[in-house]
Structures are given as C-alpha cells and as structure tokens.
Image: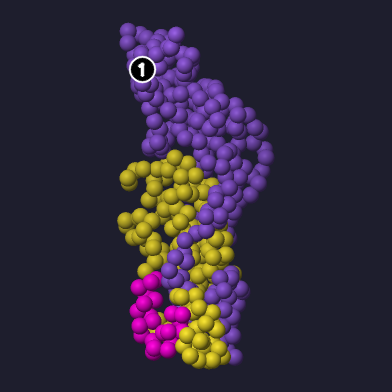
Chain colours: A yellow, B purple
Amino acid sequence: MTGAAYPNWDAVYRDNVTWVYRLMYGKVGNQPDAEDLTAEVFMTALRPLRVSATVPEVRKYLRMTARTVLASYWKDRMGRQVTLIEEDVPEVIEPESFASDAPDKVRQLLHRLPDHYRRILELRFLQAFSVREAASEMGVSVANAKVLQYRALRMAAQSGEEATS
Amino acid sequence: MSDRIVRRFADRLLRGQSTERARPDDFEAEQMKTAIELRAARLGSDAPREDFVSDLHRRLAAEMADDQTPVDHPRWAPRRRQVVIGGSVAAASAAAGLVVGRNLLAPTPTQPEAEPSTQGELEPTAGTWRPVGASVDLPEGGALSFDLGSVNGFVHRADAKLEAVSGVCTHQGCKLWLDAPDSRLRCPCHSTSFSLEGATVTHQLPVAPPPLPKFQVREINGVIEVFAPTKSV
C-alpha cells in the first residue's frame, strides 16, 4: 500500500475528512471551530496536491497543513498557541494513529485531583451536566459549583503543567 | 477577577460555542488547554456531523471545478481564489516534501499508480471475440474507436500492449469522444474526461464518476479483437 495513490480529490477527502476533523476537535474542543478549521485544511491542501502523491504522503501533507492552520487560528484568537499539532508524525501513518491520547491523559489528570474537584469536572466536561444539575448532584449551591469548577480547572492545569515539566 | 478570561472561555466551550478572541497569560492558556482536553474527552463528541461532511464536499467540488481549465478555454482568466495563510502553507508543503504546482484534477500524461481498483472488466455472460480493426491501423501510442452495436469503446496501444475500455460515460451514459491530441476520452454532457486506460481524470460533478469498464482485447493475425456480447439476432 506504500505506493498506492488516490484516484482523485474526492477519494482524498472521503478517506481523510474524519481524522482531520477529530484531530482539530481534540485541539479546539468545540464543533464550530473544528468544522471551520477542517474546511480550511481541505480548501488549502487539495488544490496544490500532486496527483501521484502516495496515500502516506497525502496524509502527512494534510497533517502539516492542519498544523499550520491551527497555529494561525490560535495566533489570531489568543495571540499564542494554546494547543498544537505535533510535528513528528509516527512512521506508520494510518488514520487511527492520529487519534489522540486525550482520554488516557484526562483520566490521569482527574485522578490526581481531590474528590470534589474531580467530580465537578467529570460532571461538567465529560457528562454534559449544566451547572445547576451538577450542583444538585453534588449537594452544593449553584454559586458553589461554579467556584468549584474554576478552582478545579486551575488545579488540573497546574498539575498538568507539573506532570509535563 | 483575574480568572475572567478562563471562566468565559470555559463557559463558551461547555456550551459548544466557538472560541472568542482573548489575550491569556501562560497559566490562563494552560487552563484553556486543560479545559479543551477535558471537553474533547467526552464520549462521542468528536465525530463530524454528517451535514458538515457533505456540505464541505459540495464546497470543495465547486472550488475544484472552478480551478479546471477546459482545453479550449483561453487561459487569461485569473484564478478566482487562492487560499493562502501568510505563506506558511507553502512552508508546510515544503516540510512534507510536497511542493507541487498541479492539482489532482489537472490532466497528467500518465498516472499508472492512480488507477482506481474499482475499475471492472466487462464480462458478458455470452460473448465472442469480434474484430474491431487492423493492427496496422493502431500504432504505438495510438487509439481507435469501435462500435459493435451492443457495446462501443476505444482501444489503444501503449508500451506495445493493447487496452480497450467502454465508450459510455459512467455518469449518465453519454457517448464519449476521442480527443486524440490530448489522449482523453471526453463526455459531451458534463465535461467529464477519462484517460485512455479508463481512469476518471477530470469532472465537475459532486462525486467522481467511476472509471470506465475494460474489455478483454487481443491481437491475432493482424486483427484486433474485443471480447463482446454475442449479437442477439
């Protein structure tokens, strides 16, 4: 399969749109931006793509384009790169290998937090509870749940920083 | 409150809204990153919407069709649109070793490895070898058309090998014509074109039409023959 190429742009799109979107979603965390960025990647990448490029070459090229598109998005929105797409691509380039290790990382992150901090983040971020629902689930006031959430996020970010440094 | 930036960011993120402009410091950016990781870890949240995928496909089809320059069209028309992000995309392409000046739809002389695997062989239930022309009429690199009534197509000789493909467009059945100077089989209906090998080369349709089916072809005693359905009299 190393020598295989795509017959046309349509095949490139169909084969790669899902992983490009997932990659972007994992980096921005919201659907509207992930959709815009995915569209930008394909709008930018398809036209100059060499017709005889092999499947791994095309995927690498898409990933490099995605990296650039994400970098310019963050620069515009935040003046800095909040998240980035790593440059070093694994040698075996299959779409699955692009899947993020986020769930594992998040599990470890939550594990390091005190119970009530972990609980509020799980309810709000992973289980889609509203503040009100999360507050009632935890038996605290809404104001309390809000404060808990932001303190928990601060601590999670701190412990994440320490874990990586 | 100094954490207003992060609060606002997290609120929007949890409501599924796009990210607003802000100027976070290091620690605020770290909290945003953590919030994104948490949000993206929600089960099933990262599958693209069906509507989005098909809508983007339509936009790309329009964009790619726009870039096509028909052979008989003057080339003075400027490209309508070039998406460039501060020149950095060129850098990305260079890094990926893919600095290129041709798009996927641009005609190319040969692209053997781009042959789609879905190209089928036309195999009639009841068939016979039928003559379609004399060997002398088909020099190396040449192509000729044939019409056997039940089927029609084009046979060409490349690298001393014969190949024959159907002469009917796989989109809506219009009859293809041989554009010999360009080595293309062109459809009069929707500007689709195929290579002599039957691969779809250019099209302006939302979905690429499949490649042309092939015929079995052979050469015996100076006569080129195609395996075609037996005539029902």
For the C terminus of chain A, the image quarter is: bottom left
Residue under mark 1: which chain is it in? Answer: B
Residue farthest to the right? B77
State which quadrant residue A89 falls in.
Answer: bottom left
Magenta extent: A102-123
Q: Secondary structure at mark 1?
A: loop
Q: Is residue A93 visible?
A: yes
Q: Using the image, determine if residue B175 lies above or below residue A41.
A: above
Amino acid tagged 1 = Ala
**Viewed as shown, does residue B227 lie left or right of B33?**
left
Horizontal and vertical percent for residue B116? 41, 37
- The residue that mark 1 highlights is B126
At a point 37% along the width and 75% down the height, the residue shown is A105
Q: Is residue B26 visible?
A: no
Q: Using the image, determine if residue A154 lies above or below residue B129.
A: below
For the N terminus of chain A, the image quarter is: top left
Horizontal and vertical percent for residue A137? 47, 85
At a point 65% along the width and 32% down the height, the residue shown is B73
At a point 60% along the width and 77% down the height, the residue shown is B22
State which quadrant residue A23 falls in.
Answer: bottom left
At a point 61% along the width and 45% down the height, the residue shown is B62
A143 vs B157, nearest the viewer: A143
Q: Using the image, determine if residue B16 lies above or below residue B101.
A: below
- Magenta segment, prevailing SS (helix, strand or loop): helix
Horizontal and vertical percent for residue A142? 55, 89
A113 vs B112, nearest the viewer: A113
Magenta span contains residue A62: no
State which quadrant residue A118 falls in.
Answer: bottom left
Number of marks drawn: 1
B53 vs B82, nearest the viewer: B53
Horizontal and vertical percent for residue B55? 58, 52
